[in-house]
Amino acid sequence: MIQENVEVLIIGAGPSGSVAASYLHNNGFKVKVVEKSTFPRFVIGESLLPRCMDHFDEVDLLQPLKDFGFEVKSGARFMRGEEICNFDFAKKHGEGWDWTWQVPRADFDTILTNTLIERGVDIAFEQEVTDVVITDEGSTITLKNSKGEISKIFAKFIIDSSGYGRVLPRILDLDKPSPLPKHSSIFAHVKDTKRPEGVEGTLITFDVLSKETWLWVIPFSNGHTSLGLVGPTEYMESFKGTNEEKLKEIIKLSSYYRDRFDEVAIDFEPKLIKNYSKSVKQIYGKGYALTGNSAEFLDPVFSSGVTFATESALLAAKLAAKELKGEEVNWEEDYYGYIKEGVDVFATYVKEWYTGNLQKIFFHRPENPEIKKQICAVLAGYVWDKTNPFVKNHNRLVRTVAKVIDMENQTV
């Protein structure tokens, strides 16, 4: 028996689901958000990109986030031994935001959902989607709550913003192997008791330990810091002991950070995610759209996860709204085609990071200011701006510049 009818059911209450819900609610649609967890809850994806500020602003969620006082992220630092490459978002190609935040997602996501609930959005926590039946008229979604009780909802459209829960890919058999290398990560939050004063203590840093392994350091405004190592799965499996013992051993690999984080208190048992890159056969179908990590996850190296989540969520919500109004929507071109363009740009940068070509450009001296501005815009999330040569010609330009650097080095 159907207990409830809605126009749009959104699966997942993170940034993606919140942006979609806010847009649809603001435009008068009957929306319900179902979330398997209770908030606040820990989740990864703590470094944002300036592009996602556009999305929060457009759906009127920016001010409550500003009010909290998250750590401002105005760029990113990449280190390799003594070599340093600093990107300043204020010195990027093109228009757009020149800052964003570094956030403990437990706080960030809770602000979003509390704001939406205050505005009248129906968000149901501890509701797991166990089945979806799609027909020409809409979809029947089966839910199970924390007590094991079953309920059913009918929705005209579903937006899957379930992230790593990947609800519709699992239920509808949409998963496919990612073409990216098999990499894994281990991470935790620590009490940053030795944090330096001033800017140094706030910088998000990617400490490159080898061509394929790197440590992230993401300081938060609450005095804690997110630490994580990314590397080939086989390499990650070489560390022995508990996850906490592994992370402590990994911290010692960083000549720059080992003293700062040696013997610090770890907030929780470190998390380990193996083979994190994900892909799907399709990101939309009759009556549904996948957003963010439920569709595609590349790699954490450029912090693109939340931005793709909010970009795709806002677009999916806009197209679903048009369709529900009876307007014609070309999902293949307007959704898949658009999202794929951005994913392809970042996929190139991820691949070329691990080939070493992008690292070669980052750490080459003297720097080329124009190239740096154009790459900085990509790192800020503006991967649909085709006035940027490093967006328009992403599939060959990184390799070409790296080859020129090789030729220069050979003549020295």
Image (cartoon, grey):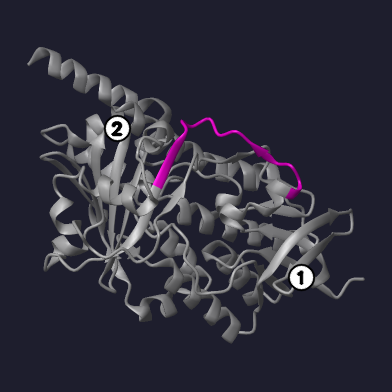
Q: Is residue 181 magenta?
A: yes
- Quick one: SS at disc 1? loop
Residue 244 visible? The answer is yes
What count of labels does the image hold? 2
Q: Are marks 1 and 2 in contact (CB under 8 Å)?
A: no
Q: Residue at x 79, y 73 (%)?
A: 149
In the rendered image, the residue lying farthest to the front is: 241
How far apart marks 1 and 2 lie (CA) works out to 50 Å
User: Of the residues tagged 1 and 2, which is closer to the observer?
Assistant: 1
Question: Which quadrant holds residue 162?
Answer: bottom right
The location of residue 76, given as percent across then percent down, is 25, 52
* Quadrant occupied by the N terminus: bottom right
State the residue position of label 2: 358
Residue nearest the viewer, comparing 178 with 10: 178
* Circle 2: residue type: Leu
Q: Residue at x 49, y 64 (%)?
A: 55
Horizontal side, residue 173 vs residue 140: left or right:
left
Horizontal side, residue 246 vs residue 207: left or right:
right
State the residue position of label 1: 148
- Quick one: SS at disc 2? helix
Residue nearest the viewer, comparing 123 with 334: 123
* Quadrant occupied by the C terminus: top left
Horizontal side, residue 406 vs residue 376: left or right:
left
The location of residue 200, given as percent across then percent down, is 14, 60
Q: Residue at x 50, y 39 (%)?
A: 275
Question: Which quadrant holds residue 410?
Answer: top left
The magenta span reads 171-185
Q: Is residue 303 magenta?
A: no
